[in-house]
Each structure stands twice: as C-alpha cells, then as structure tokens.
C-alpha cells in the first residue's frame, strides 16, 4: 500500500511536471501573423505631344476666272504639349490626370487663292470643304499679355485665343488668324492698343515673354 501511494504520488508529480512544461511551451510559442503587403505609391509627371491642323484660308481674286485655283502656301501641322500626373501603386498605374496643356507650335494653314467672286447666300459666305474665307489681310504689331485677374472688356475670362484690339480698327467679335499664334477673336482692349496694334493672350508669363513683340500678318475671317 505504501508503495502504491508512493507510485501514485510519483506519477502525479510527473504528470504535473509534464503539464507545466507543456503549458510553458505553448505559452512561449510565437504566433505567426499574416504578413502585410507594403504599398508603395509613386507620383511622376509625363509629357505627351499631339499634332493638329488648321483649316485652309481662302482669298478670292476677281481678276481670275471662276474655277481657277492656286495654292500659295502649304499647310504645316501644329503641336500641343500635354502634361500628365501619373500615380502608381506597386508599379501599377492607378491614376492618369491631365494637369496642363499648351500649344508649343501654332499650325500654319494652307493659303489658297481662287478666281471669281465669293459664293454668297442669304446667310453669308459659304466655306467649302472646311475652308475659311478671308475678308481682309492686315500687317500689325503683335505684343503679348497674360492673366491679370480681371475679365476682358467684353466680359469674358481671358484664355488663349483672346486678342486685345483697337475696336475702331478691328470690331469686337471679329475672327482672326494670326501668323505664328493661330486663330483668335477680338474680345479685349487696352489703353496702349491703338491702330494696327494687337495684344495676344497667353496662358503663362513665360509664353508671353517668349512671344515678345512681332510684326505679323493677320487674316480677318468672314463671319
């Protein structure tokens, strides 16, 4: 009986020891957590360029017979620069946003002379095949300006294509084609803009400075 009691005591101690060791091992065991994927975000800027063309300009020579046609100058495409903001996550493109665009080279339209008089209708001059009829050609002094924080004299916010003029020479609303700049509309005026002097709007100060002051040919377009 004494031996049995001692044996039971020994077995109980061994069992307790095993339980303690097992519990300690389980308690100290490192639990492996699921790994987190690191998200790497990168923002870059990219420039893309596209070309565009301008509609041909047509002048008429009544001294030439109807049907006579001569191309005085071939067209030349212009170039637009587009700046994009690209956002990548883990090297995968997730966003592409147009930040800014500007004309880096104005298109040059073909210049065509046709014989006879303009083809007129009740609504005015008809332009065939996307051609623009020229009412008058002028040689002017062209300067440049940019944002002033104010609306133009005609009440619109300035943007590329707005031209400040002397309205006694070029009425407001007149459509123009300015060599080296492109199409514009007479929609502003200034105290220093007198006679054959126009002021071209540019979107940035740098573009305006780059234009400076030039003598250019302006084609006044038919309405």
Image (cartoon, grey):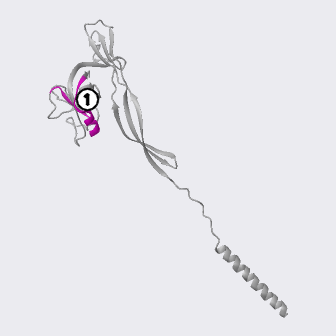
Residue 87 vs residue 1, the one in the foreground? 87
The quarter of the rendered structure image containing the C terminus is top left
x then y, percent, for residue 31: 62, 67
Q: Nearer the viewer, residue 113 or 151?
A: 113
> Is residue 138 depicted above or below 113 in this figure?
below
Q: Is residue 199 magenta?
A: yes
Residue 32 x %, y %: 62, 65
Q: Position of residue 70 (x, y in %)?
A: 33, 11
Residue wearing tag 1: 185
Quadrant in the rendering for residue 154: top left
Residue at the image point whose x is 40% and y is 29% from the top: 51
Q: Return the x and y of residue 15 as percentages of the image width and height.
A: 75, 82
Query: Which residue sits at x=17%, y=34%?
Result: 190
Residue 133 visible here: yes
**Residue farthest to the top, as pictured:** 65
Locate the N terminus and report the quarter of the image it occupies.
Answer: bottom right
Compare residues 219 and 214 and report the one nearer the observer. 214
The image shows residue 63, relative to residue 129, as above or below, that is: above
Q: Residues within 10 Å of mark 1 (few under 14, many from 20)?
A: many
Q: Is residue 5 magenta?
A: no
Image vertical order of residue 75 relative to residue 163, above or below: above
Q: Which residues are magenta?
A: 195-218
Rendering quarter of residue 158: top left
Q: Is residue 202 at least partly visible in the picture?
A: no
Marker count (numbered)? 1
Which is more toward the observer, 31 or 122? 31
Image quarter of residue 112: top left
Which element is circle 1 on? strand
């Amino acid at each position: 009986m004494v031996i049995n009691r001692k044996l039971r005591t020994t077995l109980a101690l061994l069992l307790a020891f095993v339980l303690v060791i097992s519990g300690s091992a389980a308690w100290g065991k490192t639990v492996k957590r699921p790994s987190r994927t690191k998200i790497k975000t990168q923002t870059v800027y990219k420039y893309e360029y596209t070309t565009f063309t301008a509609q041909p300009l047509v002048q008429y020579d009544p001294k030439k017979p109807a049907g006579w046609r001569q191309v005085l100058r071939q067209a030349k495409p212009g170039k637009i620069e587009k700046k994009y903001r690209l956002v990548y996550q883990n090297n995968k493109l997730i966003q592409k946003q147009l930040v800014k665009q500007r004309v880096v080279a104005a298109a040059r339209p073909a210049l065509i002379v046709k014989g006879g008089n303009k083809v007129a209708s009740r609504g005015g001059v008809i332009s065939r095949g996307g051609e623009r009829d020229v009412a008058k050609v002028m040689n002017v002094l062209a300067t440049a300006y940019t944002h002033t924080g104010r609306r133009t004299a005609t009440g619109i916010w300035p943007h590329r294509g707005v031209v400040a003029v002397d309205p006694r020479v070029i009425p407001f609303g007149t459509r123009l084609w300015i060599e080296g700049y492109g199409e514009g509309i007479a929609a502003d005026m200034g105290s220093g803009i007198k006679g054959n002097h126009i002021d071209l709007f540019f979107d940035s100060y740098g573009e305006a400075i780059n234009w400076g002051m030039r003598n250019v040919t302006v084609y006044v377009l038919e309405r």
